[in-house]
Image: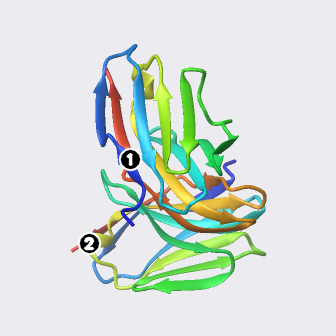
């Protein structure tokens, strides 16, 4: 079993819909990272959080440390949100990231 | 700041040749990471440095891979000799780590390596 599991693996939405991506992890962490990667593109850091909730524009990330679970929400989705979203965790000891398998999101106009 | 700068953006080389990938981290960051991304295995950490010292190289596939960080503003990842299975996108990232607190984690644009 992978230490970081994401669901769903693939998601298709219509423009304007609310999207939720889930991430569960099985190890102790110091922080969790949500990343975005457009096709053929680089990796952009969206959020790094260790508790509660963060919001940036139409993106919201939440984390529940007790349940070892995080969610990334996209409100009023847009075709430009089409990308792979990757959850990654910093182990409680150390500076290295362990990655989930990614969620491929397609937003249709 | 220009962000994490990687070069080259694309590299095509013949099997057996030496390949050197370069990375300039964000000024002031003290941690540097080399990652490899493939369709089959996703993102994998190869090695990371803290204050120019290699901390964990357990992800380096084999002796053909080596990484150096001679100073705080430059790192190289070298593959010698290269093989077709090394074809992947190689990302460099840097961050500022102060104890358990990590900030500014930033990825470079990556180097797409093709070994033919």
Q: Quadrant of residue B12?
A: top left
The residue at the point 32 percent across, 54 percent down is: A41
Residue B6 vs residue A3, the one in the foreground: B6
Q: In the rendering, at what x and y percent does residue A54 appear?
A: 55, 84
Outermost residue toward the top in this view: B16
Image spot of residue B9 (x, y percent): 30, 43
Helix, strand or loop under label 2: helix
Left or right: A101 in relation to B19: right
Q: Chain of mark 1?
A: B
Quadrant of the snapshot with the N terminus of chain B: bottom left
Q: Quadrant of residue A31?
A: bottom right
Residue A79 numbered tag: 2
Q: Is residue B27 left or right of residue A62?
A: left
- At a point 40% along the width and 84% down the height, the residue shown is A58
Q: Is residue B20 above or below residue B75?
A: above
Q: CA distance from mark 2 to mark 1?
A: 29 Å
What x and y, as percent, mark residue B40? 47, 37
User: Where B74 falls versus A22 (above or below)?
Assistant: above
User: Which quadrant of the figure contains the C terminus of chain B?
Assistant: top left
> Which residue position holds label 1?
B6
User: Which residue is found at the position 69% from the left and 80% from the top?
Assistant: A51
Q: Secondary structure at mark 1?
A: strand
Q: Is residue B43 visible?
A: no
Residue at the left extreme?
A109
Residue shown at the point (78%, 75%) measured from the top left:
A66
Tell me residue A46's x, y (percent).
47, 71
Residue density around tag 2, few if under 14, some if 14–19, many if 20 or more, within 10 Å: some
Q: Nearer the viewer, residue A57 or B90?
A: B90
Which chain is disc 2 placed on? A
């Amino acid at each position: 079993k992978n230490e970081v599991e994401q669901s769903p693996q693939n998601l298709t939405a219509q423009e304007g819909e609310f999207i939720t991506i889930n991430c569960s992890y099985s190890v102790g962490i110091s922080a969790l990272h949500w990343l975005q990667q457009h096709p053929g593109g680089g990796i952009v850091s969206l959020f790094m959080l260790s508790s509660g909730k963060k919001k940036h524009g139409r993106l919201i990330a939440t984390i529940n440390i007790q349940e070892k679970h995080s969610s990334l929400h996209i409100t009023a989705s847009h075709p430009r949100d089409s990308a792979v979203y990757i959850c990654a965790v910093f182990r409680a000891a150390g500076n290295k990231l362990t990655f989930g398998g990614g969620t491929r999101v397609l937003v249709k106009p | 700041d220009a962000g994490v700068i990687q070069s080259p953006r694309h590299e095509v080389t013949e099997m057996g040749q030496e390949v050197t990938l370069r990375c300039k981290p964000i000024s002031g960051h003290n941690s540097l990471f080399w990652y490899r991304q493939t369709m089959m295995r996703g993102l994998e950490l190869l090695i990371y440095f803290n204050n120019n010292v290699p901390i964990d190289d357990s992800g380096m596939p084999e002796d053909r891979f080596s990484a150096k960080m001679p100073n705080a503003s430059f790192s190289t990842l070298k593959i010698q000799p290269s093989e077709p299975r090394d074809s992947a996108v190689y990302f460099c990232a840097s961050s500022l780590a102060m104890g358990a607190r990590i900030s500014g984690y930033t990825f470079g644009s990556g180097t797409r390596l093709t070994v033919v």
